[in-house]
Image (tube, rainbow, N blue to C red):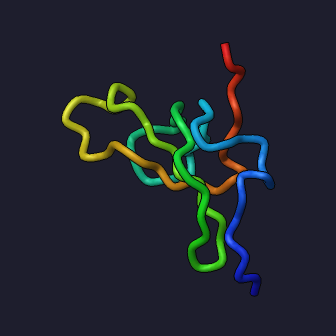
Amino acid sequence: MSTTAPSFEEYDFDRGDHVRADWTEGDGPLDVVVETVTEVSCSGGNVIVSVEAADDQYPDHSIYGGTHDCAPGWVEPLEQS
């Protein structure tokens, strides 16, 4: 197993990029999270991308919010305007 930490250089997105994360396999009320990449890390041998979601994407009184941990393949960069 590699002990090298994952790097943004390996992906089409970077910290601070606005992205769309397919969250259909995640737990929570959303199928898609659109917001900002905050980190890329490794846990249990898997690469994890953290996406910070805006609170206005959630239903009222939702217990969910904040950062979503995603597989890199779930993350799609959005065009910068």
Q: In the image, what residue occupies the spot 68% across and 71% down? A: 5
* Residue 71 sits above or below residue 64 on the image: below
Q: Is residue 78 above or below residue 62?
A: above
Residue 49 or residue 30, whichever sits in front: 49
The residue at 68%/26% (across/down) is 78
**Spot occupied by residue 12 in the image (x, y as percentages of width and height):** 78, 42
For the point 53% across and 52% down, the residue is 50
- Based on the displayed image, in which of its 4 quarters is residue 57 positioned? top left
The one of 80 and 27 positioned closer to us in this rendering? 80
Direction from residue 55 to residue 71 in the image, left or right: right
Question: Is 33 positioned to the left or the right of 40 in the image?
Answer: left
* Above/below status of 31 relative to 72: above
Looking at the rendering, which quadrant does residue 79 occupy? top right
In this view, the residue farthest toward the left is 61
Which residue is at the front of the view, 5 or 25? 5
User: In the rendering, at what x and y percent does residue 6 appear?
Assistant: 70, 65
In this picture, is 66 found above or below 5? above
| Quadrant in the rendering for residue 59 | top left
Query: As drawn, is 55 to the left or to the right of 74?
Result: left
Quadrant into which the N terminus falls: bottom right
Residue 23, percent from left and from top: 55, 45
Q: Residue furthest top?
A: 81
Q: Is residue 51 left or right of residue 12?
A: left
Q: Tell me the quadrant of the picture where the C terminus can be found.
A: top right
Number of numbered discs visible in the structure rendering:
0
Q: At 70% from the left edge and 33% from the top edge, which residue is drawn?
A: 77
